[in-house]
Image (cartoon, rainbow, N blue to C red):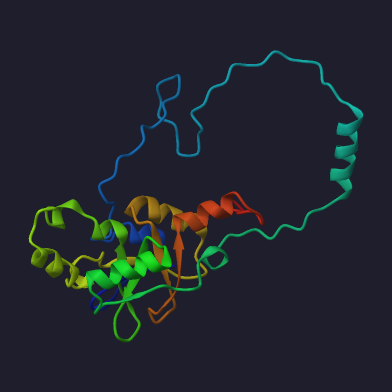
């Protein structure tokens, strides 16, 4: 289940398919990879690899004693799988948030001190109202020139994070499917999603890095179970 929160509270709650129809949370301007094309000219589906390998010459099977032993071992040893499939399995539960009263300077210090690239922004009641990313702080069109007066830079540092944060912002429930979260991250261009409870309070954060880390470590990430 996905939700969208803005300065006035919850604006939407529904499925991934419904979220894709919500205005204001669409994709950022991003380059997209070229779609693979099959030899017959048709476009390949997302689940096609688009890779064509030459047919290998049939080779006589080479089976040695070690392979036989490993095969026998695999038949008698079972590994208990505890697949990761929901947001709760992967999310960072130590939620790092910014108050909506924070300044740009305070935001810089928080992101640097915590070594994170983004932080959900919450109001005085602790409810989600936006998301601030390091990229938002570094947009070239809002930074003064290097030779600008010190007062110009000081004014920028005292600017409120509400003026530059991403809002409204999508969020996700802890029991949501990881594959659907990955789809929303691709569609929106966001580096991650705040995880919220039913009241809109931030309980964690799930990022692209969290998903990638699960892909290469155990227990396995089971997207297709």
Q: Is residue 215 visible?
A: yes
From the image, which quarter does the N terminus lie in? Answer: bottom left
Q: Based on the displayed image, in which of its 4 quarters is residue 222 positioned? A: bottom right
Name the side, left or right, on which 77 lies relative to 138.
right
State the residue at coordinates (38%, 78%). Answer: 200
| Residue 101 x/y as whole percent | 24, 79
Which residue is nearer to you in this view: 147 or 25? 147
113 is higher (above) or lower (below) than 207: below
| Residue 37 x/y as whole percent | 41, 26
Which residue is nearer to you in this view: 67 or 19? 67
Name the side, left or right, on which 81 lies relative to 75.
left
Residue at the farthest top position: 57
21 is higher (above) or lower (below) than 6: above
Q: Is residue 171 visible?
A: no
State the residue at coordinates (39%, 55%). Answer: 185
| Residue 206 x/y as whole percent | 46, 63
State the residue at coordinates (33%, 57%). Answer: 20
Q: Based on the displayed image, in which of its 4 quarters is residue 90 positioned? A: bottom right
Name the side, left or right, on which 53 lies relative to 219.
left
Which residue is nearer to you in this view: 206 or 112? 112
State the residue at coordinates (62%, 52%). Answer: 217
Q: Based on the displayed image, in which of its 4 quarters is residue 160 positioned? A: bottom left
184 is higher (above) or lower (below) than 3: above
How many callouts does the rendering have? 0
| Residue 145 x/y as whole percent | 11, 53
From the image, which quarter does the C terminus lie in? Answer: bottom right
Name the side, left or right, on which 210 lies relative to 22.
right
């Amino acid at each position: 289940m996905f939700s969208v929160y803005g300065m006035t509270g919850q604006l939407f709650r529904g499925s991934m398919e419904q979220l894709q129809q919500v205005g204001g949370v669409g994709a950022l301007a991003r380059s997209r990879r070229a779609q693979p094309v099959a030899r017959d000219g048709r476009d390949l589906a997302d689940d096609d690899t688009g890779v064509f390998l030459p047919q290998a010459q049939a080779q006589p099977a080479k089976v040695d004693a070690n392979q036989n032993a490993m095969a026998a071992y695999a038949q008698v040893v079972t590994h208990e799988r505890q697949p990761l499939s929901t947001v709760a399995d992967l999310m960072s539960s130590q939620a790092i948030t910014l108050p909506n009263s924070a300044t740009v300077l305070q935001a810089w210090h928080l992101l640097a001190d915590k070594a994170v690239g983004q932080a959900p922004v919450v109001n005085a009641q602790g409810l989600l109202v936006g998301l601030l990313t390091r990229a938002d702080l570094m947009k070239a069109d809002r930074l003064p020139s290097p030779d600008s007066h010190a007062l110009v830079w000081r004014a920028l540092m005292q600017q409120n994070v509400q003026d530059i944060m991403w809002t409204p912002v999508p969020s996700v429930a802890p029991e949501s499917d990881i594959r659907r979260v990955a789809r929303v991250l691709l569609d929106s261009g966001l580096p991650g999603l705040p995880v919220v409870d039913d009241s809109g309070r931030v309980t964690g954060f799930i990022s692209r890095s969290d998903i990638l880390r699960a892909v290469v470590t155990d227990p396995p990430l089971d997207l297709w179970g």
